[in-house]
Amino acid sequence: MDIDKIIEVLSKCQTPSEYEIKQLCNKAIEILIEEANVLRIVPPVTICGDIHGQFFDLVELFDLGGSPFETNYLFMGDFVDRGYYSLETFLYLLALKVKNPRRISLLRGNHECRQITKVYGFYLECVKKYGNGNVWRYCTEVFDHLSLTALIGNSIFSVHGGLSPSIKTINQISLINRKQELPHEGPMSDMLWSDPESIQNWGMSPRGAGFIFGSEVVKNFNRTNGLSLVTRAHQLCMDGFQYMFNNSLVTVWSAPNYFYRSGNIAAILEIGNNLTRQFKTFKAAPKEKRIVKVKMTIPKYFL
Amino acid sequence: MENSLPTKKIKSSEDLKFWFTSDAYYYLTQWIRLLSLKIKDLKNTQECKISDTVQNILNILDQLSNLIDETPPDNQPTRFGNKAYRTWTNKLLKKSEQIVTSFLPEKYSEYNSELGVYFLDSFGNPRRIDYGSGHEINFVCFLFCFYKLGVVTDEDLPALILKVFVKYLQVARKLQKVYNLEPAGSHGVWGLDDFQFLPYYFGSSQLIGHRELIPSSIHDKMLLKEHSDEYLYFRAIQYIHEIKTGPFFEHSPILNEISNVATWRKVNSGLYKMYLDEVLAKYPIVQHCYFGKLLPFTDEIRQKREKEFKESQKMEKKTIKNEK
């Protein structure tokens, strides 16, 4: 497998052959399978939120945050669904990971699973681009191996969704068997589906999966685990990021102008050597940079 | 059991096969087909019989719209949606008893609270400050309840869409705009529309026999302006232009492709199939559906179907064994 050639192709938002994708995914699994449920990351690192197939906005992100060959990145999941380029986006990040496993860290989001991608666009995109579901299958196998959380410099905890009532200490996360399709309930599901809310403790989530959790929960979790900050994604933010609970938790969102209507800006969080925090924000890629090559066809229902 | 309100019954994607064979599924799918049929070739401005029951729903929707005017967006810091939406919802809940008890004539008043569950969940989710096709389903279920009870008859059906559903959409869109509601569970470029589905389905029926307007007419901004008051489909497209940025083919590719379909009749029948596949067959949406006395998906039915399913699996295994 020529990883440099694959990266070159993907960097232009083009797709490699089905065979190359299979090779890439197999290689990625070899790397991911060795990674723990809690990735240990030494700063500096730039933390990013949801991308949802917005490839050209990912390019803007790299323009702002620095080349992925020279800058350490942590992506908190939700690479796929809703946008045009879920495949190119995910495979590009995966190829960068394979090229430099220590530099690029990828976490699983709630969209990185079979059930959700069959509803929200990734499956359709794969079939449209390759005529069959093979590429989707290869990718969902990779999803099963993605790590769940990260610990940066021992005091910043990162996860896609949020906390779980079943997880009081970070050590407990290591006991989870993550190499499976995302379950409907349990700690693994909770961490990828939960949301912070302006309450004190736990509540039912209106999403139908995970929970909502409040200030006391975060306070206790941070104290028990010696954390200064929980970073998460999963929810759209008008300003790209939003602090809650006295700056002990922050949502980072990296898909600008979501749905072409939200008018939101996107953000990345740069963690420096001494765990300093700096947010940088960016807008959607301008028209000239967005090439829509996906040729949609009349859906089967109308034929 | 007698006094219980509608509840959610679809707990996992394994339940979907029972949902498809339930009474509720049958009623709902036939209901939307019937409504589509009843407004074929009719404009929104068509004169309709408006019964007292229907007029009452219209009045309530007007009240809800006024409530938005009385509850302007606030300046509180927010993640995305405006928190004044929660204030609006609380005001609605305060009025809910008065509203809900007015729905039905005296002899059916025991069903008011059942209708109330559907109605009150038709306008978005106050916790998440979002709105999606699940809320639209709730409103359609709400309307179905009147028909099931016989309080509304075939004669009233045109008014239910051309007047009531149109006004419901006005309220929903006003909420979406004023409070910046997030699209709940949108499929992005892979879906029809961020917020609604049925205006396109019902709207295409209105246009089936139209002499001049064809599916590709939606690209003509003048025609959109001219006809958005008369036709649900055109208003829906116009609304997208009001809230989205960039070229239409980029942000709404599915609607763009549908504009290449030759006839409205084909659009209408295609949208029906698409609705069944993309909305009613998707667990993330239907997990939020409510089932009660009027739209039943009782545990009895579910247990019966589960038993039938297991029996059929056993029979299949036996047959295969015998064949070997």
Image (cartoon, rainbow, N blue to C red):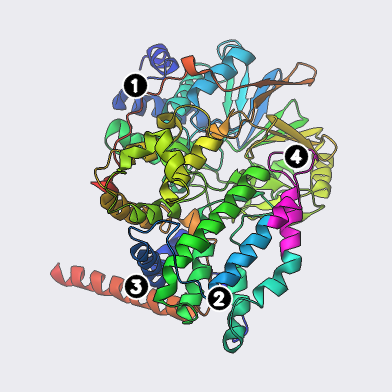
Residue A144 in sight from this viewpoint: no
Give the number of the disc on residue B309. Answer: 3
Residue B298: x and y in percent read 49, 78
Query: What's the CA distance linking mark 1 and mark 4?
Result: 41 Å
Mark 2, Cα crowd under 10 Å, few <14 / some 14-19 / many 20+, is some
Q: Which residue matches tag 1?
A: A16
Q: Amino acid at mark 2?
A: Thr
SS class, disc 2: helix
Image disc number at residue A213: none
Confirm whether circles 3 and 1 share one chain. Answer: no
Along the line of sight, the residue nearer the viewer: B203 or B190 = B203
Give the Cα distance between marks 2 and 1.
Answer: 61 Å
Residue B107 shows in the view? yes
Residue lying at 32% horizontally and 29% vertically, measured from the top left = A295
Q: Looking at numbered disc 1 in the image, what kind of residue is underneath it?
A: Pro
Q: Which residue is mark 4?
A: B78
The residue segment tinted magenta is B66-92
Residue B258, by quadrant, is top left
Q: Which residue is mark 2?
A: B53
Mark closest to the chain's N terminus, 3 or 2: 2
Q: Is residue B305 left or right of residue A99?
A: left
Q: Chain of mark 1?
A: A
Do badges 2 and 4 share one subunit?
yes
Name which of mark 2 and mark 4 comes first in the sequence.
Answer: 2
Assess whether mark 4 and mark 2 are in contact (beta carbons under 8 angstroms): no
User: Which mark's residue is nearer the viewer, 2 or 4?
Assistant: 2
Protein chain holding label 4: B
- Residues marked 2 and 1 touching at CB (< 8 Å): no
**Whether labels 4 and 3 share one chain:** yes
User: Does the residue at mark 3 contact the one at mark 2 (Cβ under 8 Å)?
Assistant: no
